[in-house]
Amino acid sequence: MTLRLILRGLLIIVALTLCSYLLKSLVDAAWIDAHVRGHGIPGELLFLLTGWLLTSVGLSRQLIAFLGGYAFGFLPGVLLAAVATVAGCITTFYVARRLLRNFLLQQFAGSLDKVARFIKENTLSMTVLIRLLPLGSNAGVNIAAGVSGARSLPFFLGSALGYLPQTVIFALVGSGTGVNQYWQVAVAMLMFVVATLLGAMLYRKYRKGMSLGPHLDRELGIDKSAAAR
């Protein structure tokens, strides 16, 4: 059920908030404080480079957004996290397409096929739809799009647009914990619930009979007969 997705996301938000509190309470020089937060342009560039590289190899984009909000505040955190995440998306896409396509198709064709077919048709809208859902592997979607025949620019634009709601939510959480304004965490949790319900509704309405897999359909309360129509 969609409720399970919502509860899972809310638990992630709570866990990030608690981890941030513990870091500030127990650690005098956490990496983000020692090298990024309050270090001006060099700190911003280091964050961008680190976020770009880590999202390229599969680190959670939500964590990058959280750390961006924590280090730089809400709006700068959203912007920097969005740039880093889209850069990681582009990198993984082209590595999969230009360097690893034959290997990936030979070894993982079955697991990549559902996402690749979902994205290939109506790339922009389907990519936005996938990115709105708070589950799955960000890097896995990038790889699947790379090995498919999906057009690159609509995929990157769809990713940037689809990333934005969760980037805003998790940057808001991070900025709230960074300045001990925990009301922001409550607002972010409410926004997460709304965004998840919206993503689930759009998936049910616009997937055009396609499916990203039985696991996701079960999470969203879609039965097999409905998925087949």
Image (tube, rainbow, N blue to C red):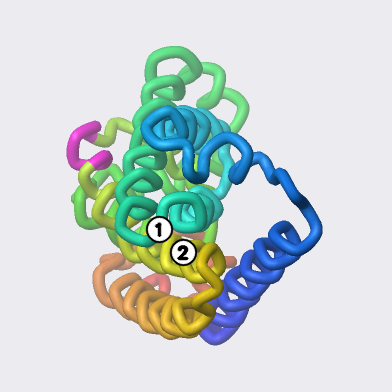
Image location of residue 73, percent across then percent down: 40, 58
Residue 224 sits inside the magenta stretch: no
- The outermost residue toward the right is 26
Residue 154 sits inside the magenta stretch: yes
Image location of residue 68, percent across then percent down: 46, 50
Image location of residue 229, percent across then percent down: 34, 74
The vertical placement of 66 against 137, above or below, is below
Q: Secondary structure at mark 2?
A: helix
The vertical placement of 5 against 132, above or below, is below
Foreground residue among 196 and 76: 76
Residue, x 55% and y 18% (percent of image)?
Answer: 103
Q: Amino acid at mark 2?
A: Ser
Foreground residue among 41 and 111: 41
- For the residues labelled 2 and 1, say whether their Cβ atoms are less than 8 Å apart: yes
Image location of residue 97, percent across then percent down: 39, 21
Disc 1 crowd rating (10 Å Cα; few below 14, some 14-19, many 20+) is: many
Q: Which residue is mark 1?
A: 73
- Image: magenta residue range: 151-156
Mark 2 and mark 1 lie on one chain; the one further toward the N terminus is 1
Q: Amino acid at mark 1?
A: Gly
Q: Which residue is mark 2?
A: 175
